[in-house]
Image (cartoon, grey):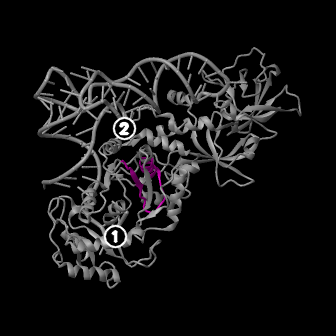
RNA sequence: UGACCCAUGGUGUAAUUGGUAACACACCAGUUUUUGGUACUGGCAUUCAAGGUUCGAGUCCUUGUGGGUCAACCA
């Protein structure tokens, strides 16, 4: 239901408007071709998911195609390991790129030809200034830059020098190729940008073939052009690159791909900076890149999020050019909504105390049916055992309950979900004075499905039979930070907002026997608790479950308000 | 002492391109319920400011104000 849930009137964002207008004017003969161009230097996160969604969904909407292109122009930062992880994440999100995955590095030959053409046409020159000198000559926002002494070399000399760069005659950092544009341009990027640098480094794809590598600006637009990309959508921070993007395409006289920029999606309490994510991993504040608290796609997956939920979240948050901070409430609402439809209902007691049914026959065990999903009759049922002694949650019994407490208390009636109505009679306490055992009587004629007891109860509780319950470890996650925008504080490091309680491990929970044979990817709803999924750390001896998200809980909210 | 982008409720997106603010989340109040879940009902903004054009402006113009981005041989 997830994706088709919204359709309604087909909301148009500014990219749709551009494409529809292009389609109408037959700008590219009705062709729509987009691309997702990650640099393989890290794992994909929720922000990438948005970019992926925009490109793939938009292309799909107009019968177009989307390429996957690894933007791998900097050999020292990139690695094959990331290439594979990125592919897996995109597929998991539900998208298939056009043909084979592509690599900017496969265009190095073509890009080199382009560079020579630029030189021959007098639009590029080899500069021998030091990095410091080049920075110095760049000027500032307020002051124009100054021309490099190498700016007016002849095309012949430039070509010779550039070829020597390629041949490996020069050491790293000694020479660069720069586009000859305008050292006084208000846009700093147009002040004779460096387009090729010497880098004697091994490349994950091209090996040792090259010792000069193109810069982003001299690779991205041209790669788009080579692939015939019609609409190249990227985030706002590349806006200032657009004039350069257009400049190269014009000077080279190649296919006119166009760049459009959208605002990246920010989510409250999440960070998407690679550098900071890495810091969390390195400082062991999380258990790796796929820690269920991480904003990475692999983390969200391990947490139990569904791909269709992430897609719908992307859809609901829209596409626009203004800064935005999406609330986590929306993400959680979407995931709950989807999980509600597919999650198998099970009962798990998180803080067990024993409930003894004094009038239940000693040694008797009943098998009772439990509906797998009330939203979906086809999901069927599973059986649960029921006997004289069962586990209930500690906070489902109170000696001195507040008003409107519908759970168990002395002399109060309550229904045990799928079983019988019971009435609490007495209780026992442990050495610390805490309730350890509740004794009750049950009403045989109130059996679920054939209740003719006439007793009305306000509350229904979950429970687990002591004869078949299995111990499980629960990993309860909360937001990773205590502040919605942890990296927006100039005076404080984002780690100061690390939420120490973002992971709470519960190792005393007891689950109904069904859990013992739950599938690895089966979405579960622990009734009255939340949605869970099996974690990969589980072993045959020890079942570990991650909490995806809590159930909405108006009772808890009300209680909180009263304090 | 620059250039560019942006500005609708608590949050996020809409508004037939000038025709009288919609949807979702959140929140509040209820109904239903063998999950205090789900479902359902109702409530919740005159569009940053000030001028202007117009019969009519969230949409156009002007001037402000506020926020963001840009000076890596990174992408």
Instruction: Confirm whether residue A420 shows in the render.
Output: yes
Q: CA distance from mark 2 to mark 1?
A: 36 Å
**Residue A53 position in % (x across, y down):** 45, 47
Judge by depth and name the residue closer to the eye, A55 or A477: A55
The x, y position of residue A378, in whole percent, is: 69, 33
Q: Is residue A44 magenta?
A: yes
When the figure is inspected, residue A357 is found, relative to residue A511, above or below; the finding is above
* Picture layout, residue A13 above or below residue A79: above
Mark 2 = which residue?
A12
Magenta stretch, residue numbers? A30-56
Q: Earlier in the sequence, mark 2 or mark 1?
A: 2
Percent across and percent down for residue A89 are 52, 54
Chain ID of residue with mark 1 = A
Vertical relation: A539 (above or below) A150? above
Which mark, residue A259? none
Chain letter of mark 2 equals A
Mark 2 touches mark 1? (CB < 8 Å) = no
Residue A467 on the magenta segment: no
Q: Residue at x 52, y 58 (%)?
A: A87
Nearer-the-camera pick, A124 or A319: A124
Question: Measuring 89% from the left and 31% from the top, which residue is drawn there?
Answer: A362
Residue at the farthest top position: A454
Residue at image location 44% in from the left, 31% down from the top: A8
- Badge 2 element: loop
* Disc 1 secondary structure class: helix
Residue position marked by numbered label 1 in the rendering: A111
User: Where does the image place residue B48, in percent across and percent down from the top left?
Assistant: 24, 33
The reply to the same-chain question for discs 2 and 1 is yes
| Corner quadrant of residue A202 | bottom left
């Amino acid at each position: 239901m997830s994706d088709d849930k919204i359709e309604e009137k087909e909301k148009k964002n500014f990219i749709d408007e551009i494409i529809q207008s292009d389609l109408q004017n037959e700008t590219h003969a009705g062709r729509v071709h987009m691309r997702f161009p990650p640099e393989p230097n890290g794992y994909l996160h929720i922000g990438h998911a948005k970019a992926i969604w925009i490109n793939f969904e938009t292309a799909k909407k107009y019968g177009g195609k989307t390429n996957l292109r690894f933007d791998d122009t900097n050999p020292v930062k990139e690695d094959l390991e990331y290439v594979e992880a990125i592919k897996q994440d995109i597929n998991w999100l539900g998208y298939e790129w056009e043909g084979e995955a592509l690599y900017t590095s496969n265009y190095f030959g073509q890009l080199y030809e382009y560079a020579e053409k630029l030189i021959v046409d007098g639009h590029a020159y080899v500069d021998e200034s030091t990095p410091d000198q080049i920075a110095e000559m760049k000027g500032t926002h307020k002051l124009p830059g100054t021309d490099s002494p190498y700016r007016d070399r002849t095309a012949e000399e430039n070509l010779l020098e550039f070829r020597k760069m390629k041949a490996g005659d020069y050491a790293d950092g000694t020479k660069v190729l720069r586009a000859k544009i305008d050292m006084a341009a208000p846009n700093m990027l147009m002040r004779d940008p460096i387009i090729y640098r010497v880098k004697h480094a091994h490349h994950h794809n091209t090996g040792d073939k090259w010792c000069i590598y193109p810069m982003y600006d001299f690779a991205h637009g041209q790669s788009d052009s080579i692939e015939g990309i019609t609409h190249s959508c990227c985030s706002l921070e590349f806006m200032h690159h657009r004039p350069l993007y257009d400049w190269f395409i014009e000077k080279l006289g190649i296919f006119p791909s166009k760049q459009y920029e959208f605002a990246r999606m920010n989510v409250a309490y999440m960070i998407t900076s690679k550098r900071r994510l890495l810091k969390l991993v390195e400082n062991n504040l999380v258990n790796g890149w796929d820690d269920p608290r991480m904003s990475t796609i692999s983390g969200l997956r391990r947490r139990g999020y569904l791909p269709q939920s992430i897609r719908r979240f992307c859809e609901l948050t829209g596409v626009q050019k203004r800064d935005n901070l999406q609330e986590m409430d929306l993400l959680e609402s979407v995931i709950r909504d989807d999980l509600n439809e597919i999650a198998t209902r099970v009962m798990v007691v998180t803080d067990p105390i024993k409930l003894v049914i004094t009038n239940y026959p000693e040694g008797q065990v009943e098998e009772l049916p439990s509906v797998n999903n009330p939203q979906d009759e086809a999901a069927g049922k599973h059986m649960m055992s029921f006997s004289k002694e069962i586990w209930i949650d500690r906070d489902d019994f109170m000696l001195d309950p507040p008003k409107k407490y519908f759970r168990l208390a002395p002399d109060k009636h309550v229904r045990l979900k799928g079983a019988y109505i019971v009435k609490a009679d007495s209780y026992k306490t442990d050495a610390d004075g805490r309730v350890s055992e509740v004794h009750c009587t049950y009403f045989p004629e109130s059996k679920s499905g054939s209740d003719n007891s006439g007793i009305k109860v306000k509350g229904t509780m979950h429970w687990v039979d002591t004869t078949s319950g299995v111990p499980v470890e629960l990993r309860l996650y909360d937001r990773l930070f205590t502040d919605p925008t942890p990296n927006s504080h100039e005076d404080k490091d984002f780690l100061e907002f690390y939420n120490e309680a973002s992971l709470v491990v519960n190792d005393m929970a007891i689950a109904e026997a069904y859990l013992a044979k739950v599938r690895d990817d089966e979405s579960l709803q622990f009734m009255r608790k939340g949605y869970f999924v099996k974690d990969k750390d589980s072993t045959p001896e020890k079942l570990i479950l991650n909490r995806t998200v809590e159930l909405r809980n108006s009772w808890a909210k009300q209680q909180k308000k009263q304090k």
